[in-house]
Amino acid sequence: MTNRPAQFVLKVNGATHVVSASVRTPLLYLLRNDLALNGPKFGCGLGECGACTVLLDGVPTRACVTTAEVALGREITTLEGLGTRTALHPVQQAFIEEQAAQCGYCLNGMIMTAKALLDRDPHPDVATIQHELSRNLCRCGTHVEIVRAVQRAAQLLAERADAHDGAHV
Ligand code: FES
Ligand code: FES
């Protein structure tokens, strides 16, 4: 390992990016400062709050305490990789429908963590959702709305899957 700048490739949201930096640079800095992907937020910088969460090969990962080296060769997904303003991902749509934000600073981490949960378990019960999100901090106290949003997202994903199946009958 070295602190010297090097050129390496990061795979982010289905695209490859050449980055010049030390491989020990926190992934969050490269995403925000070099690639202008500002979905992941800088909260504590200590791996404690979850605001910076991205998916590494589908697994929620705290980008503030993950070096670029750990992400090499892996698929990085940020909030920007889920949906767009005109084609929201069902998890994003559900958070809007349930008005699950006050300041919104925690939502990146909540949404990315919920997305990974629903990929793994499409019908989680409330206890499972609460447990999964328990390490994501929300200083505004919107946990009730956030849990409701994840339940709504599960419903939207199921409806989408049914519509997809129906189209192929
Ligand atoms: S900013 Fe990464 S966990 Fe808080
Ligand atoms: S909505 Fe403000 S930190 Fe969660």
Image (cartoon, rainbow, N blue to C red):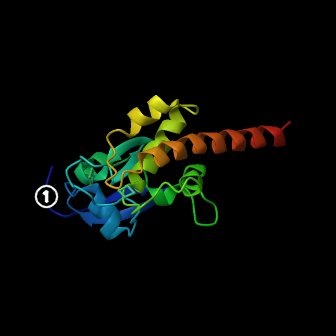
Give the answer, above or below, for where 79 lies relative to 126.
below
Q: Nearer the viewer, residue 53 or 35?
A: 53
- Say which residue appears at 82% left-offset and 39% top-offset: 166
Image position of 157 (left or right of 124): right
Image-quadrant location for residue 26: bottom left
| Residue 106, horizontal then vertical, whole percent | 37, 55
Q: Which quadrant contains ligand 2?
A: bottom left
| Residue 11, horizontal then vertical, whole percent | 42, 54
| Residue 104, horizontal then vertical, whole percent | 41, 61
Q: Nearer the viewer, residue 158 or 151?
A: 151
Q: Could you tell me how many numbered marks the image carries?
A: 1
- Say which residue appears at 48% left-offset and 37% top-offset: 117
Image position of 118 (left or right of 22): right
| Residue 156, horizontal then vertical, whole percent | 65, 45
Whether residue 16 is visible to the viewer of this picture, yes or no, is: yes
- Say which residue appears at 34% left-offset and 45% top-offset: 136
Amino acid on which disc 1 is placed: Asn
Q: Is mark 1 within 8 Å of ligand 1?
A: no
Q: Nearer the viewer, residue 90 or 66?
A: 90
- Say which residue appears at 13% left-offset and 58% top-offset: 3
Whether residue 75 is visible to the viewer of this picture, yes or no, is: no
Give the answer, above or below, for where 93 lies relative to 85.
above
Residue where numbered disc 1 is placed? 3
Dot 1: element: loop
Q: Quadrant of the C terminus?
A: top right
Image position of 31 (left or right of 145): left
